[in-house]
Image: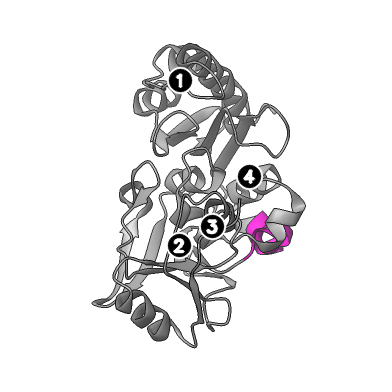
Amino acid sequence: MKPAAFAYAKARSLDDAIRLLGEHKGEAKLLAGGQSLIATLNMRLSQPSLLVDINGVAGLDGISVKNGMVEIGAMTRHVTLERSSDIAKHAPLIAQAMPHIAHPAIRNRGTIGGSLAYADPAAELPACLVALDGEIDIAGPKGKRSVKAGDFFKDLFETALGTHDVLTAVRFPAAGTETRVGFAELARRHGDYAMVGLAAVAKASGKSLSDVRLVYFGVGATPVRARKAEDALARGSVDDAVKALDLDPTSDIQATADVKKHLAGVMLRRVAKQLLGEA
């Protein structure tokens, strides 16, 4: 299929992008990497009256590490994150996730901001940002604000972004000497959407874990924290953590709910080995 007719505007600045969004009262869409948007346009799942191209807006990309925090501009391409020595050192969870995101051609164009704003429940980066206890910076007609990643994802493809808002950057604590991360996903083919995936962060002291955060993707309408399993893993028992998995996945085209629940346990055992330094 081909997209329905739409107008096109290239934003000259962040304020210009916000103005254009406001003028079209919810009928405009931002164009960043376009790797999700173009597909929905072609299938006519999205039919905006205007595309606002923000690729020329200065100051929306780049990676910085300062004051113990990693900040990533929304227009930073996946491939940049994948190849960044700063990400490898200070954000190893992001580094582990990047090769699982689609295919090289898509990672060359796709952006971290676009992935978070689209909020696909089977996508890797939303779960990673929740696991990292990150924040998302948003600019809109009323100024700028920050939203915790755990509060940003509202429902299926729904976020805290208003129709006139632009996601500008993400921020999360840099990994320290005690930080351990784990990542695993199962897809039918490499690069496909995950049937079930898990992003995890913890602090480690020998074989003891604390501040465990286990965030699943592909099992619900948003990234899902398994809080009871977090507590059990922090107490030292992987078996108890698997038994305590507090997930209620729904069946979809990928797998039944029962299969997803089983795979969630498999992913937890794999990730627990990474957190415990056994893998």
Amino acid at circle 1: Ser
Residue with the mark numbered 3:
37
Marks 4 and 2, Cα distance to the nearest angstrom? Answer: 17 Å
Q: Position of residue 75 (x, y in %)?
A: 56, 69
Q: Name the secondary structure under disc 4.
A: helix
Residue with the mark numbered 1:
251
The quadrant holding residue 185 is top right
> Is 85 part of what is drawn in magenta?
yes
The outermost residue toward the bottom is: 12
Amino acid at circle 3: Leu
Q: Given this view, does label 2 or label 1 mark the residue nearer the observer?
A: 1
The span picked out in magenta is: 77-88
Left or right for 234, reference 65: left
Left or right for 66, reference 150: right
The quadrant holding residue 61 is bottom right
Q: Name the secondary structure under disc 2.
A: strand
Task: Tell me: residue 16, above or below residue 135.
Answer: below
